[in-house]
């Protein structure tokens, strides 16, 4: 359910932004895509299967500078590189790419709607908007992943007869 909803929204954004992709300057876009890929490869491994990816910075830059067309091109690179590197299942790569598109679009729209021109006099406003864009990215990414996790746990717990509110206590593969 979560995969269909998130990937459906991301597909709608992709279709809406696709005509504008051809108007983007290819050199900066290629640079942002390269930075996303490098940032994903250089992610910091924390524990067994968890990592902290630094590719969020170029993803945010792709949302702020070229806008939504830039994010729909650059953000999926992160999920694809991570999927190939960690041999992730295709539906997880699709969900992650869709989540990054949604989160980057939220961040990019905040910056585009309120963002002034890049000028030193506008630095306080630019910093505030960059912080809000980062917060939007984090919020959308976190809640879409949390929604996915909750739906997976609910599905697993329903097969066991346990309820989430009672604290299933079992793994998601009951």
Image (cartoon, helix red, strand yellow):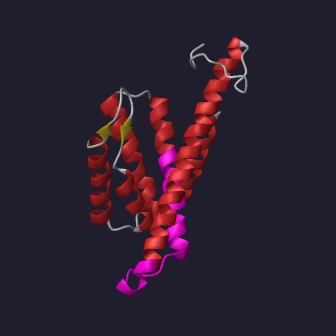
Q: Residue at x 35, y 30 (%)?
A: 47
Residues 101 and 30: in front is: 101
Q: Which residues are magenta?
A: 99-124
Quadrant for the C terminus, please. top right
Q: Residue 56 location, x and y as percent?
A: 39, 52
Quadrant for the N terminus, please. top right
| Quarter of image, res 6 | top right
Relative to 173, is 155 on the left or the right? right
Q: Residue 8 location, x and y as percent?
A: 60, 44
Q: Residue at x 59, y 51 (%)?
A: 12
Majority secondary structure of magenta residues: helix
Q: Is 150 included in the stretch rendered in magenta?
A: no
Residue 93 seen in this snapshot: yes
In the rendered picture of this protein, how many numbered marks are placed on residues? 0
| Quarter of image, res 41 | top left
Q: Residue at x 35, y 57 (%)?
A: 58
| 69 w.r.t. 84: above or below | below
Q: Is 121 included in the stretch rendered in magenta?
A: yes
Q: Residue at x 64, y 19 (%)?
A: 156
Residues 139 and 111: in front is: 139
Q: Residue 103 location, x and y as percent?
A: 52, 53
Residues 50 and 102: in front is: 50
Relative to 16, is 38 on the left or the right? left
């Amino acid at each position: 359910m979560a995969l269909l909803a998130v990937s459906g929204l991301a597909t709608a954004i992709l279709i809406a932004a696709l005509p504008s992709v051809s108007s983007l300057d290819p050199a900066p876009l290629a640079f942002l895509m390269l930075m996303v890929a490098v940032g994903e490869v250089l992610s910091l491994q924390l524990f067994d299967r968890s990592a902290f990816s630094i590719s969020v910075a170029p993803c945010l830059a792709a949302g702020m500078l070229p806008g939504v067309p830039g994010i729909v091109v650059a953000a999926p690179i992160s999920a694809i590189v991570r999927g190939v590197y960690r041999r992730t299942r295709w539906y997880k790569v699709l969900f992650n790419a869709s989540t990054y598109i949604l989160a980057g679009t939220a961040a990019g729209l905040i910056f585009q709607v309120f963002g002034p021109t890049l000028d030193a006099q506008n630095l306080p406003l630019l910093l505030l908007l960059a912080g809000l864009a980062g917060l939007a990215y984090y919020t959308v990414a976190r809640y879409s992943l949390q929604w996915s996790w909750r739906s997976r746990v609910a599905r697993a717990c329903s097969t066991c007869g346990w309820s989430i509110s009672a604290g299933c206590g079992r793994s998601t593969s009951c």
